[in-house]
Image (cartoon, rainbow, N blue to C red):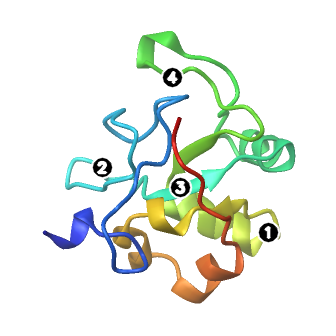
Amino acid sequence: MNDLAKNVLGGILQSCSTDPMTGFFRTGDCQVTEEDIGNHGVCIVATAGFLAYSKARGNDLTTPRPEFDFPGVNPGDRWCLCSTRWQEALRDGMAPQVVLEATSSAALEFIQLADLERHAYPARREK
């Protein structure tokens, strides 16, 4: 197993969401590869507050964009977020909760594990 297939806890990277389908390659997981220059490695649980914050910062996650296979994110949805956006939200006091088991170890290039752990969301099983 390569490091990119690991989560931040050192285990096998778990699925983030298949409804909506997330991930840089829309595979349901937050695996980061060389093609993913945005490092979409953080599996978040979206909140209305975070979605409004992200939109105000120029990253509208709520408006569907079918041409990019993007359904729009709603509060309660899990979504693979760019590591730098999560770090920015943390700095601004708006960081959403994180599913550690579904967050790529590649996120640790930008984010301290202790910060992710403070925002941990209990894992849930995919349906």
Of labels 1 and 3, earlier in sequence is: 3
| CA distance separating discs 3 and 4 | 16 Å
- Residue highlighted by disc 4: 70
> What amino acid is found at the position of numbered circle 3 in the picture?
Cys
> What amino acid is found at the position of numbered circle 1 in the picture?
Asp
Secondary structure of the residue carrying numbered label 1: loop
Of labels 4 and 1, earlier in sequence is: 4
- Residue highlighted by disc 3: 43
Of labels 2 and 1, earlier in sequence is: 2
* Residue 59 position within the rendered picture, expressed as x and y whole percent measured from the top left: 64, 40
Which circle, 2 or 3, is nearer the viewer? 3
Secondary structure of the residue carrying numbered label 3: strand
Of labels 2 and 3, earlier in sequence is: 2
Q: Tell which residue pokes out farthest to the top in this image.
A: 67
User: How many C-alpha atoms fall within 10 Å of the one at disc 3: few (<14), some, or many (≥20)?
Assistant: many
Secondary structure of the residue carrying numbered label 2: loop
- Residue highlighted by disc 2: 36
Of labels 3 and 4, earlier in sequence is: 3
* Residue 57 position within the rendered picture, expressed as x and y whole percent measured from the top left: 72, 47
For the residues labelled 2 and 4, say whether their Cβ atoms are less than 8 Å apart: no
Secondary structure of the residue carrying numbered label 4: loop
For the residues labelled 2 and 1, say whether their Cβ atoms are less than 8 Å apart: no
Q: Nearer the viewer, residue 39 or 21?
A: 21
- Residue highlighted by disc 1: 92
**Residue 114 image-quadrant placement:** bottom right
Which circle, 2 or 4, is nearer the viewer? 4
User: How many C-alpha atoms fall within 10 Å of the one at disc 2: few (<14), some, or many (≥20)?
Assistant: some
For the residues labelled 1 and 3, say whether their Cβ atoms are less than 8 Å apart: no
